[in-house]
Amino acid sequence: MIDTLLDWFDENARDLPWRKAGTTGWGVLVSEIMLQQTPVARVEPIWLSWMARWPVPSALAAETQGEVVRAWGKLGYPRRALRLHAAAGVIAADHGDVVPSDVDVLLGLPGIGAYTARAVAAFAYGQRCPVVDTNVRRVVARAVNGAGDAGPPSTTRDMAETEVLLPPEPARAAKASAALMELGAVICTARAPKCADCPIVTDCAWVLAGRPAYDGPAKAVQKFAGTDRQVRGLLLDVLRGSAEPAPKTRLDVVWSDAGQRDRCLHSLLVDGLVEQTSDGRFALPGEHR
DNA sequence: CAATCGTGGGT
DNA sequence: TACCCAAGATT
């Protein structure tokens, strides 16, 4: 099954910029952080501009936090930008400006968790380690376990289930990890899987079982409209678009509920995504001491 | 373990 | 139109 998948990947892998030969560990790391919960299409242009502007970790680390948050644009979850900036500082200071290849070292860097650490180890350094994202969880749930979809995540179990699928040779294992993700992203999708185009359809336990519906616990649907996430996004968008610190009156117009507005502004300050200047205005961090 | 944290395109 | 969902990490 994996051999078939590898052949399919050789022929059908998307031509994504961070997959080009010569992409550094830094390039891979930046792509992986940006891709956390953010679609490929939205990441591509930002990743290209970041690589041109900050080709090595020390270059990013030399920027202010605010400039990094501004360049993050509307990728969403802007705390990722702050963490990546911090990680770049550690890599520049402690690792010779080279992204570490050891999973445990990677796990110690801000913003890098179980998925991202192994993605970097596999895709940048060709290591054999289970790279489990939402795509892989779904593919394994279907093809191996015969379920309609993955149940609640369990990092330990998910990694164990994936690890046994990997070929013994590190290079092939790393490619298999990319192929599993690719299959989940373009063929074995969440909504309407394209089983007719699937290279492993004849081995798929889910198809062989007649594609039974998912029967696990219902997945919590994330609301957005009216949440603090929306309000924080609106507030930060004002500051991203402002070269100078903004008076609070400019922030007050983005949301009518003053209580929620102030709570969100406070949380942004706590998160370090916003700073208050000495004269009481608000700005992205690090630019207007 | 469960809640929280942005944003916008597809259906 | 609502709702789903997208290469997760942190607390």
Image (cartoon, coloured by chain):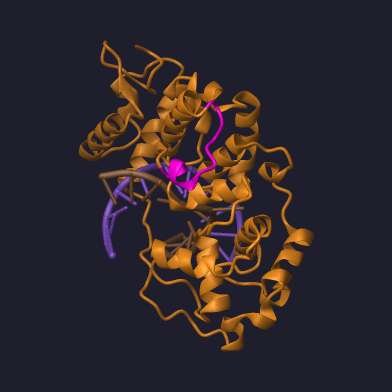
Chain colours: A orange, B purple, C brown
Farthest-out residue, right: A11
Relative vertical location of residue A113 with respect to residue A258 in this rendering, above or below: below
Q: Is residue A261 magenta?
A: no
Q: Residue at x 42, y 41 (%)?
A: A111
Residue A93 position within the rendered picture, expressed as x and y whole percent measured from the top left: 46, 23
Q: Residue at x 23, y 37 (%)?
A: A263
Residue A254 position within the rendered picture, expressed as x and y whole percent measured from the top left: 35, 34
**Quick one: A185 or A4, which is closer to the camera?**
A4
Q: Residue at x 50, y 29 (%)?
A: A95
Residue A153 position within the rendered picture, expressed as x and y whole percent measured from the top left: 40, 65
Relative vertical location of residue A233 with respect to residue A145 in this rendering, above or below: above
Relative vertical location of residue A84 with respect to residue A288 in this rendering, above or below: below
Please state, as top left, top right, bottom left or bottom right, where the C terminus of chain A lies in the image.
top left
Farthest-out residue, left: A259
**Quick one: A47 or A263, which is closer to the camera?**
A47
Q: Is residue A106 magenta?
A: yes
Magenta highlight range: A96-107
* Quadrant in the rendering for residue A29: top right
Left or right of A86, for residue A129: right
Relative vertical location of residue A146 with respect to residue A242 in this rendering, above or below: below
Farthest-out residue, front: A168
Tell me if I can see residue A13 in this picture: yes
Tell me if I can see residue A37 in this picture: no
Q: Residue at x 42, y 32 (%)?
A: A82
Please state, as top left, top right, bottom left or bottom right, where the N terminus of chain A lies in the image.
bottom right
**Quick one: A240 or A108, which is closer to the camera?**
A108
Left or right of A76, for residue A18: right
